Image (spheres, rainbow, N blue to C red):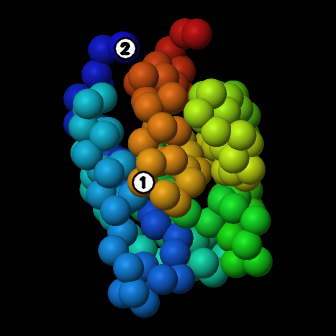
Amino acid sequence: MEKALQNFKVAVLTSSDRCSRGETQDESGKLISEMVKAIGGQAAACDIVPDEIDRIKERLIYYCDTLKARVVFTTGGTGFGGRDITPEATGQVIERLIPGLSELMRAEGLKKTKKAMLSRGICGIRKNSIIINLPGSPKAVKESLEAVLDLIPHSLEMLDGGGH
């Protein structure tokens, strides 16, 4: 694994109507916050919003532009349901796509279940931040994040002008 960066800011956004109403607990957001510690990530913000495009966009823009989180993870809203719009919200705020991270998460998930190919999550760059859409279930979050976690430090170095 790449050498861990020192305490870089991470933000976690859970997009879930049920979690936002308090009907269920957000296990995925907590899991992300714990997993990123292995590479030096420190959760500076963890929020839950309903599956509403404007609310998701507002949080993503805040995390990147104001909070200046280096990595923003979303969880939830990547499926086929009518209110699953996290990739669309993300697509409206990023400046550049990082298709390889999404492809890797789906490819690694495919080794366990064909259903991994149904995740519509995207990844991209806004200013000096990387945004990564993860699925909603804790199991899928763990598997997806494990697939890309060791690439994040080098990705941030590249974003900061480091070599490939």
On screen, 70 above or below 31? above
| Residue 96 visible in the displayed image | no
Q: Secondary structure at mark 1?
A: helix
> Taking the image as drawn, is residue 9 in sight?
yes
Give 30 or 115, whichever is nearer the viewer.
Answer: 115
Which image quarter: residue 66?
Answer: bottom left
Which mark is in front, 2 or 1?
A: 1
Taking the image as shown, residue 30 lies to the left or right of residue 159, namely left
Where in the figure is residue 88, as x and y percent of width and height?
Answer: 74, 63
Give the residue at x 30% y 57%: 30
Upstream in sequence: badge 2 or badge 1: 2
- Answer above or below: position of 151 versus 137: above
Residue at the far top in the pictured view: 163
Instruction: Residue 119 in the image: state x and y as whole percent.
Output: 69, 50
Give the amino acid type for the residue marked by disc 1 in the picture: Pro
The mark found on residue 15 in the picture is none
The image position of residue 89, as x and y in percent, is 69, 65
x and y percentages locating residue 39 in the rendered image: 30, 29
Helix, strand or loop for disc 2:
loop
Q: Quadrant of the N terminus?
A: top left
Pointer 1 residue: 138
Q: Residue furthest front?
A: 113
Residue at image position (48%, 23%) is 151
Mark 1 residue crowding within 10 angstroms, few (<14) / some (14–19) / many (20+)? some
Q: Amino acid at mark 2?
A: Glu
Please give the name of the residue rendered at 36% of the width and 69% of the height, measured from the top-left corner: 26
The quadrant of the picture occupied by the C terminus is top right
Q: Is residue 57 left or right of residue 139?
A: right
Q: Nearer the viewer, residue 102 or 158?
A: 102
Badge number at residue 2? 2
- The residue drawn where x is 70% and y is 78% is 83
